[in-house]
Image: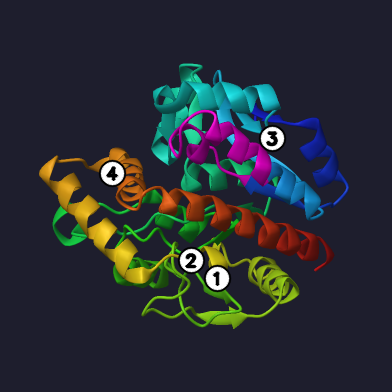
Amino acid sequence: MNQYLDIHPDVAKALANNQPVVALESTIISHGMPWPENSETAKLVEQTVRDNGATPATIAIINGRLKVGLSNDEIDELAKAGLSVTKCSRRDLPFVVAKKQMGATTVAATMIIADMAGIKVFATGGIGGVHRGAQETFDISADLQELGKTNVAVVCAGAKSILDLGLTREYLETLGVPVLGYKTNSLPAFYTRESEHTVDYRQDSSEEIAQFLSAKWNMGLEGGVVIANPIPEEYAMDSDKIKNAVEQAVKESVEQNIVGKESTPFLLARVAELTGGDSLASNIQLVLNNARLGSAVAADYCKA
């Protein structure tokens, strides 16, 4: 057992009994939306996992401890602290742990800590990827490198639409990361159900996905899997409206020289403003949708 790791008793019990567990990230709590909506949403996602037969394991760093599963008080603590909490990817974990600080986990950091605990399925909103203009800036999310080497499946609504989806898709292919489409042949674009890009393999049931994961990892093929789950149709946004908002937000981020780990929170917040809050409402619904699918995949993986 990792000396820095604390696994919540409910999560430890489920893992010991080969019962389904779904990892959840914490950046959405501290950096994704304001208090108290962030806390309410985090608890709603956890309850959605429970309602679908799995145990939720929200992951964060609290006072230098890697937490796998949070209490309601710990969720509130993260949510109230908001942007003062360090947003953690792989490079940030040693610093935050050594300094005994609080940290909110990105996709990459959540995968790392989930893997330490033996959790194989993680549900989130969207993965990071290759940013627009990366040919000049080299701004590429560490999420992609983590997917190339850490054995955790990530259920998401595709890559965030603020990114360059084509380059993100190419980078995943280079790293050998399979992109599975749940009941779709098209790579979802976060707020919209489709894009001009395809997935590697369409899978029409959680059982098929679980069998894929089992075959991959039992063969010793290291690395994660992207499970692309389109946003429910009733919550999908107009593609032109989102495209215009994203382009405006990206333009402003360039003008204000916002780069690195600050770029994604800025872009998502600005898109939410430009869409009158519609994108935030859609974001919450797609996370809940991914929690449902993640729970089903985790349950079937326990039987695979």
Three-letter residue code for mark 2: Ala
**Spot occupied by residue 208 in the image (x, y as percentages of width and height):** 71, 77
Give the labeled residue for mark 3: 69
Give the residues drawn in magenta, as a range: 24-45
Image quarter of residue 196: bottom left
Which one is closest to the eye, mark 4 or mark 1? 1
Classify 121 as above or below 192: above
Question: Are the residues tagged 2 and 3 within 8 Å (C-beta)?
Answer: no
Find the distance from the CA under tag 1 to the CA under tag 2: 5 Å
Earlier residue among tags 3 and 1? 3
Query: In the shown orientation, is residue 128 left or right of residue 111?
Result: left
Kind of element beneath mark 3? loop
Q: Which amino acid does label 3 sit on?
A: Gly
Pick the front one: 214 or 14: 14
Tell me the number on the disc at residue 168.
none
Mark 2 and mark 3: Cα distance apart in space: 30 Å
Q: What element carries label 1?
A: helix
Residue behind mark 2: 236
